Image (cartoon, grey):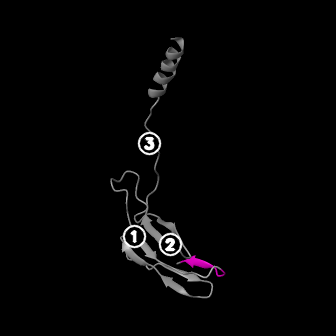
Amino acid sequence: MKYKMYIILFIIPALGCKKAYNPKVTGSSTNGYLVVEGVVNSGGDSTIISLSRTVGIARATTLNPESNAMVSVESDQNTSYPLKETTPGRYTAYLRLDHTLKYRLR
C-alpha cells in the first residue's frame, strides 16, 4: 500500500507545473524569411522541394507557401533540371543524376 501512495505523490505535483510560454518577439518582416525544405534525389525517388515564408508568431495562419518560383537543380557541368510546381509551394521532378557530378538547388 505504501508503494501506491508514493506514486500518487509524485504524479500530483507534475500535473500542476504547467506555465504558459510567451516569448518576446522583436522586429518583423513583411514577407518573412524564405524556408527551403527537401532533398535532391539522384534516382529511385522523386526530388521534392518545398518553399514557404515564415509567418509572425501571433498570426492565425501557419502556412505561407511560396508559389510561382523558378526552381531547378543544376550540375557543375551547367546542366539544368527544372522542377514543376505540383501544389502551392511544392516543386517536384524525377531526376536521374550522374553520381560523379556536383549539384546545387537554384
Picture layout, residue 82 above or below residue 17: below
Residue at the (44%, 42%) spot, across then down: 22
Q: Looking at the image, is mark 2 or mark 3 nearer the viewer?
A: 2
User: What segment is highlighted magenta in the picture?
Assistant: 100-105
Which mark, by number, is residue 22? 3
Position of 102 with respect to 17 (left or right) is right
What is the tally of numbered marks visible in this picture?
Answer: 3
Q: Say if the magenta span includes residue 76.
A: no
* Identity, as a three-letter code, of the amino acid under mark 2: Asp
Position of 52 with respect to 100 (left or right) is left
Residue 1 coordinates in the image, percent (x, y): 50, 11
Residue at the (41%, 70%) spot, across then down: 90
Q: Earlier in the sequence, mark 1 or mark 3?
A: 3
Residue behind mark 2: 45
Residue behind mark 1: 89
Q: Quote the CA–CA distance across marks 2 and 3.
A: 41 Å
* Identity, as a three-letter code, of the amino acid under mark 1: Gly
Residue located farthest toward the top when viewing the structure as drawn: 1
Q: Quote the CA–CA distance across marks 1 and 3.
A: 30 Å
In the rendered image, is residue 4 in sight? Answer: yes
Q: How would you rate the neighbour count of disc 1 (Cα within 10 Å): few for under 14, some for 14-19, many for 20 or more? A: some
Residue 103 coordinates in the image, percent (x, y): 60, 79
